[in-house]
Image (cartoon, helix red, strand yellow):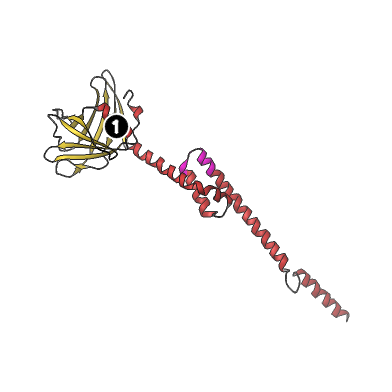
Amino acid sequence: MKTLNIEVAALAFACALLSGCAGEDPAVAAKAAAEESAKQAAAQEAKAQEGAAAFDDAVKKENWSLAKAQADVLIAQYPDSAATKRVRPEYDGIKRKLDETREAARTAALWSYGTQSVKGGLQRSSAIYARDNVDVDGTGPTQVRLIFRDHPDWGRSSYLVLQNGDFNCYGGCRVQIKLDGKPAKSLPGSRPKTDEAIAMFIEDERALWKMTKSAKTLEIEFPVKGLGKRSAVFEVAGLDPGRMPGW
């Protein structure tokens, strides 16, 4: 009998160690699971808040690329967090600003600027190639360049330059200018009698400069030898007017 009592006591002790022979209390298990879930949710929200703080900092600095990247991470990794719900309404605006910034950088890079010491002072220039090459001599598309120049002796001028072919404007002509697809305006042109470059001046350089500063795209229609008229489109929105003081 004494041996049986000892065995019963040992079994009871083992059951206690194993949280009871009948199994763990469901209420206790549910509470523990809820506490663990809440702990994980709090940790996720804390990480999301860190991401949102980084997003806010990027927005404050107008770093749209970083702001969008932070928002992308929040939406992908913490879609149901309070931080993401706060940031999400700003997403489309941030993406739009990023697109605008990238487009501004792209169009600015289309322009090239030069400063050269010449007799009498400095020669300054601003130049841009047409968006698409143009066939000006029947042999295939080639580059067309628009240049604004400020020379201490020759003054200010604007002109087109071809690599091949020639302008049909030796006795003077008219060129048609369209700003952002609006109705064309006519300006006088002339082809100087020189073999140094295939160039045609657009005589009213002040008017053309003013047009260029106010436009996103500038389309110039000009006459070429043997082929009639051709058009070149220039994406001029990125012009830096400060590169040509006094214009």
Q: Position of residue 147 (x, y in %)?
A: 26, 31
Q: Is residue 244 visible?
A: yes
Marks counted in the figure total 1
Residue 142 position by quadrant: top left
Q: Nearer the viewer, residue 108 or 3?
A: 108
Which residue lies most toward the bottom here?
Answer: 1
Q: Is residue 59 magenta?
A: yes
Residue lying at 66% horizontally and 59% vertically, measured from the top left: 36
Query: Left or right: 210 with respect to 168?
Result: right
Residue type indicated by callout 1: Met
Q: Is residue 9 magenta?
A: no
Magenta: main secondary structure = helix
Q: Position of residue 237 (x, y in %)?
A: 33, 36
For the record, the magenta segment spans 55-65
Q: Position of residue 234 (x, y in %)?
A: 27, 38
Q: Nearer the viewer, residue 211 or 2?
A: 211
Residue designated by label 1: 211
Q: Quadrant of the N terminus?
A: bottom right
Q: Is residue 70 visible?
A: no
Up the image or down, 82 lies above or below 13; here it is above
Q: Nearer the viewer, residue 147 or 229?
A: 229
Which residue lies most toward the top here?
Answer: 120
Which residue lies most toward the right here?
Answer: 2
Query: Left or right: 240 with respect to 229?
Result: right
Residue lying at 34% horizontally and 28% vertically, measured from the top left: 243
Q: Quadrant of the C terminus?
A: top left
Up the image or down, 88 lies above or below 115; here it is below
